[in-house]
Image (cartoon, rainbow, N blue to C red):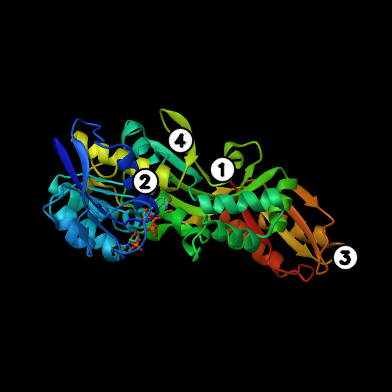
């Protein structure tokens, strides 16, 4: 499907849309495959909103669906966002019109990727979404193309820059979650409604997409087990550091003979581990293949420049004429997603208890853990100023999650334990 001129409709002129229009005005005649990319229509909510580029000469569409279906463009770029609503309607309209689609929309692909892939492939057109995961860092292409000859066992990493920024600032500045979040919102690193980011949902969208690409199954966001960073206390960041760890929001997808386990939760990474070293708004990803071994990539996961570069790379792919399956294999042959019960998974853990300052407490906690079958790896008691009690913290050897939660339930009921113990997993990478 090569052409001399590719006429592109762009819906969404916010951070990423602005980045794309600036990119194309900096690179007039962007012609990665010989043909030239030209914007022939734009859509956003407000036509009169001041924008960091001139749209006065571009055909304007109030309705992104009309833009998507317009015969005046050959390629549709969706940069609105949201799993449903105008973004989904416009992508469907473009695909139904037999047009290639490029999107940065992780919510759309994670929640409707399987049905959209069927539609795209039935029309013989590409549906590309490199910018949807890790922004400018090419994770999607790596899994869909470069590693398609391998059998991937796991993918895991830091997929949300806002959470990584907040955790890094809490760790380096000794500041509480709410304080850092408020600053991140002032600086524009976090949305005014930060739920998608700090609740772990954005990372869950991204890891669901990576799981589909890695394992050849339909993306199944609904099966992801999700815990965000909104419950992280500065005390845990400090105690984890004393034990030689940093707290990171880790998203992971593991394949086993039972199925696929997709999880997002705050996890401890050893301080010298690349994940612990990836600070600020960086994203980082480990991919473990059966033949290739382990690959590590790290880079910017958001921002106008990096994300627009990924969108431009997808546009270039469309212009070269290549059409690959949307995920790892044709949409009609995607394997069913069989979720694995997280309570059966094995792993090491960090447990923090707030206890009464009285003799015999540590013995009671240790005995309860031993009776439940949880073996202690290290133990730390620090004199932290806290009028309500004394925190003690320990790490465990690998244990089944169901055994661990049963032990926590029992310890929470001990008379000398003042609140439910805090559990953080230790990253398995
Ligand atoms: N920001 C990042 O760094 C980044 C990174 C990776 C992926 N993404 C993804 O890229 C997409 C866009 O993100 P963004 O940060 O650029 O969002 P944004 O700044 O909020 O921009 C959204 C754009 O969509 C337009 N829009 C909203 N509702 C619309 C409607 N009903 N019809 C037409 N246009 C509509 C808005 O119009 P107005 O401008 O008139 O309000 C705005 O231009 C999302 O899927 C996001 O998840 C973003």
Q: Which residue is mark 2?
A: 131
Number of numbered tags placed on the structure image: 4
* First in sequence: mark 4 vs mark 3: 4
Front position among marks 1 and 2: 2
Chain-order first, disc 1 or disc 4: 4
> Residue 284: percent from the left, percent from the top?
50, 41
Write down the residue under mark 3.
358
Which one is earlier in the sequence, the residue at label 2 or at label 4? 2
3 or 1: tag closer to the N-terminus: 3
Q: Is mark 2 within 8 Å of ligand 1?
A: yes
Q: Position of residue 169 (x, y in %)?
A: 64, 51
Residue 127 is tagged as: none
Mark 2 neighbour class, 10 Å CA radius: few under 14, some 14 to 19, many 20 or more = many
**Residue located 57% across and 50% down the image:** 165
Neighbourhood count class around disc 4 (C-alpha, 10 Å): few under 14, some 14–19, many 20 upward: many
Residue at which label 1 appears: 428
Q: Estimate the spatial distance between the alpha carbons at disc 1 and disc 4, rounded to whole Å.
A: 12 Å
Estimate the x, y position of residue 138 in percent, counting from the top left: 39, 38
Tag 3's secondary structure? loop
Residue extending farthest to the right is 359
Q: Does the residue tagged 1 have its C-beta within 8 Å of any atom of ligand 1?
A: no
């Amino acid at each position: 499907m090569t052409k001399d001129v590719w006429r592109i409709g762009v819906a969404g002129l916010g951070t990423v849309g602005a980045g794309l229009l600036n990119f194309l005005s900096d690179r007039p005649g962007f012609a990665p495959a010989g043909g030239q990319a030209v914007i022939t229509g734009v859509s956003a909510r407000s036509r009169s909103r001041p924008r960091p580029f001139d749209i006065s000469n571009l055909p304007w569409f109030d309705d992104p669906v009309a833009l998507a279906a317009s015969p005046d463009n050959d390629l549709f770029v969706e940069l609105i966002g949201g799993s449903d609503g105008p973004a989904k309607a416009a992508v469907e309209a473009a695909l139904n019109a037999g047009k290639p689609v490029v999107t940065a929309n992780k919510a759309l692909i994670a929640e409707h990727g399987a049905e959209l892939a069927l539609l795209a492939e039935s029309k013989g057109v590409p549906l590309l979404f490199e910018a949807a995961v890790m922004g400018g860092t090419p994770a999607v292409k790596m899994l869909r193309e470069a590693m398609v000859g391998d059998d991937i066992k796991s993918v895991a990493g830091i997929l949300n820059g806002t959470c990584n920024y907040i955790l890094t600032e809490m760790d380096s500045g000794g500041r509480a979650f709410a304080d850092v979040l408020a600053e991140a919102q002032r600086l524009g690193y976090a949305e005014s409604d930060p739920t998608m980011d700090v609740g772990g949902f954005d990372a869950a969208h991204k890891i669901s997409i990576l799981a589909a690409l890695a394992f050849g199954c339909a993306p199944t966001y609904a099966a992801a087990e999700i815990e965000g960073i909104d419950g992280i206390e500065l005390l845990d960041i400090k105690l984890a550091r004393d034990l030689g760890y940093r707290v990171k929001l880790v998203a992971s997808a593991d394949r086993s003979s039972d199925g696929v386990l997709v999880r997002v939760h705050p996890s401890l990474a050893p301080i010298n581990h690349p994940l612990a070293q990836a600070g600020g708004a960086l994203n980082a990803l480990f991919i473990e293949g059966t033949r290739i071994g382990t690959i590590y990539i790290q880079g910017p996961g958001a921002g106008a420049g990096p994300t627009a570069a990924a969108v431009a790379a997808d546009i270039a792919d469309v212009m070269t004429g290549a059409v690959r399956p949307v995920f790892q294999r044709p949409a009609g042959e995607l394997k069913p997603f069989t979720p694995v019960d997280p309570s059966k998974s094995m792993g090491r853990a960090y447990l923090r208890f707030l206890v009464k300052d009285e003799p015999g407490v540590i013995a009671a906690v240790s005995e309860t853990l031993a009776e439940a079958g949880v073996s202690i790896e290290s133990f730390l008691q620090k004199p932290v100023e806290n009028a309500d009690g004394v925190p003690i913290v320990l790490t465990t050897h690998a244990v089944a999650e169901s055994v661990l939660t049963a032990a926590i339930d029992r310890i929470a009921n001990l008379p000398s334990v003042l609140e439910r113990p805090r559990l953080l997993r230790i990253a398995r990478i």
